[in-house]
């Protein structure tokens, strides 16, 4: 025997929706480029070993790192006090790291990146590093790719695993 679901009673009163108190952000994380694309260039790779590790890393990136960038964007990009934030491994890219980043980026972004951008690595201890460009005039950060394994600026104490054998690509 099936039970009949009782009809819901409607009220004649109209319910007012709460007023939205969200202000427009003064900072934008603009995902214009396919920044989660896998890249292999010489000793650099951002492939994963398998789907589970990729899912875990992307979830952490979206739910933890990106909101922290919004919260601390002024301290990172304008005040340069990134060491006082949870994203304390953030810094301008220079020297050999910048040369390698530009080489990698030129392979998948055909346009020249304008000169009014500054090149950044944004990340925290033990977390991934987002490589991107910051444009002061727009107060916007454009992620270009992710250095999941800290290979752009390696640390011999932490970069022990052979990531060059990783082949997992979520796009295939």
Image: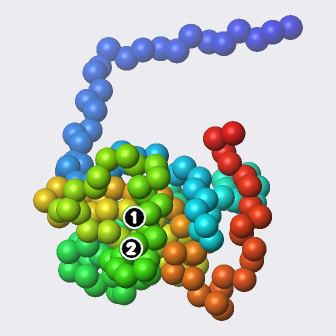
Q: Position of residue 25 (x, y in %)?
A: 22, 54
Image height check: is 119 above or below 145?
below
Q: Position of residue 99 (x, y in %)?
A: 40, 72
Q: Position of residue 75 (x, y in %)?
A: 26, 77
Residue that protrudes farthest toward the left in the picture: 137
Residue 98, numbered label: 2
Left-right relation of 66 to 142: right
Whether label 1 touches label 2, CB < 8 Å: yes
Q: In the rendered picture of this protein, how many numbered marks are placed on residues?
A: 2
As rendered, which of 34 and 74 lies closer to the eye? Answer: 34
- Taking the spot 71% from the left edge, 9% from the top edge, the residue there is 4
Left-right relation of 83 to 19: right
Label 1 crowd (10 A; few <14 / some 14-19 / many >=20): some
Left-right relation of 87 to 115: right
- Quadrant, the C terminus: top right
Give the residue pinned by disc 1. Answer: 102
- Taking the spot 33% from the left edge, 56% from the top edge, the residue there is 142
As rendered, which of 13 and 131 lies closer to the eye? Answer: 131
Image height check: is 117 above or below 55?
below
Q: Position of residue 29 (x, y in %)?
A: 33, 55
- Taking the spot 66% from the left edge, 58% from the top edge, the residue there is 47
- Taking the spot 22% from the left edge, 56% from the top edge, the residue there is 114
Task: Say which element carries label 1.
Answer: helix
């Amino acid at each position: 025997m099936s039970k009949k679901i009782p009809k819901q009673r409607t009220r004649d009163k109209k319910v007012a929706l709460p007023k939205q108190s969200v202000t427009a952000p003064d900072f934008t994380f603009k995902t214009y480029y396919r920044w989660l694309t896998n890249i292999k260039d010489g000793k650099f790779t951002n492939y994963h070993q398998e789907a589970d590790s990729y899912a875990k890393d992307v979830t952490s990136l979206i739910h933890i790192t990106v909101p922290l960038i919004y919260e601390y964007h002024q301290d990172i990009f304008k005040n340069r006090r990134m060491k006082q934030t949870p994203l304390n491994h953030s810094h301008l890219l220079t020297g050999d790291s910048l040369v390698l980043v530009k080489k990698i980026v030129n392979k998948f972004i055909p346009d020249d990146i304008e000169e009014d951008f500054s090149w950044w690595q944004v990340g925290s201890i033990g977390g991934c590093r987002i490589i991107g460009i910051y444009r002061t005039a727009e107060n916007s950060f454009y992620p270009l790719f992710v250095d999941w394994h800290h290979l752009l600026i390696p640390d011999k104490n932490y970069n022990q695993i052979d990531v060059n054998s990783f082949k997992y690509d979520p796009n295939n």
